[in-house]
Image (cartoon, helix red, strand yellow):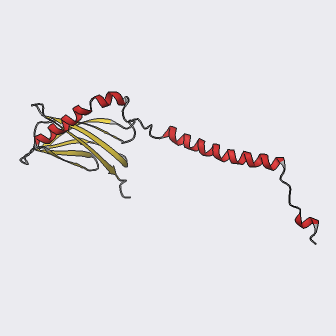
């Protein structure tokens, strides 16, 4: 026969049950609070303030894209440490001159860092604006317009790396 002391286990009391339930719900509440903090301190998810109003302009955007393709213009984006540059060429490969080029430069997920730039023609077809960008992902939304009313939109996302030490 076995002794009674060997078979007797510690009883599961009300106090152990209370601590088990508190620990279980404590983990769930801590996880929810962490997720809520991340949700409130990161990207809001808002792309447009009113999606219905934005949807009304959808066909206008399609028509503008088709008109841009018909011009035959091409663009090339580049940047260095202190500026961004956009080159515009017509269908024949000649520089497109005398454009009014404005751009919004900012982070893709927030409007806090947005800045409006006016690019100036420094060479035929080459438009430049000074910038000093912190490392990370950036989004450029540039609109060029000629005196005749022809417009060209360029949207470019790029990464700025930290300078080598």
The residue under the point 28% across, 42% down is 140
Asked whether residue 101 appears in the rendered view, the answer is no
Left or right, residue 157 beside residue 91: right
Residue 102's x, y, as percent? 22, 35
Q: Quadrant of residue 7?
A: bottom right
Nearest the camera: 35 or 81?
Answer: 35
The residue under the point 11% across, 36% down is 98
Q: How many marks?
A: 0
Left or right, residue 31 beside residue 135: right
Asked whether residue 144 appears in the rendered view, the answer is yes
The residue under the point 68% across, 44% down is 25
> Which quadrant holds the N terminus?
bottom right
Residue 12's x, y, as percent? 83, 53
Q: Quadrant of residue 126?
A: top left
Left or right, residue 83 beside residue 13: left
Q: Residue furthest bottom?
A: 1
Left or right, residue 51 beside residue 118: right
Residue 120's x, y, as percent? 18, 38
146 in relation to 164, above or below? above
Nearest the camera: 30 or 11?
Answer: 11
The residue under the point 19% across, 35% down is 64
> Which quadrant holds the C terminus?
bottom left
């Amino acid at each position: 026969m076995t002794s009674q002391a060997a078979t007797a286990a510690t009883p599961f009391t009300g106090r152990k049950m209370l601590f088990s339930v508190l620990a279980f719900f404590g983990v769930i509440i801590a996880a929810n609070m962490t997720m809520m903090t991340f949700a409130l301190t990161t990207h809001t998810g808002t792309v447009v303030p009113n999606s219905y109003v934005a949807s009304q302009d959808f066909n206008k955007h399609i028509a503008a894209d088709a008109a841009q393709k018909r011009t035959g213009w091409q663009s090339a984006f580049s940047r260095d440490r202190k500026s961004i540059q956009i080159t515009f060429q017509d269908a024949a490969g000649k520089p497109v001159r005398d454009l009014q080029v404005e751009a919004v430069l900012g982070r893709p997920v927030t409007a806090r860092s947005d800045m409006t730039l006016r690019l100036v023609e420094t060479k035929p077809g080459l438009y430049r604006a000074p910038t000093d960008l912190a490392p990370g992902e950036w989004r450029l939304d540039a609109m060029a317009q000629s005196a005749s009313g022809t417009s060209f939109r360029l949207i470019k996302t790029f990464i700025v790396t930290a300078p080598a030490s």
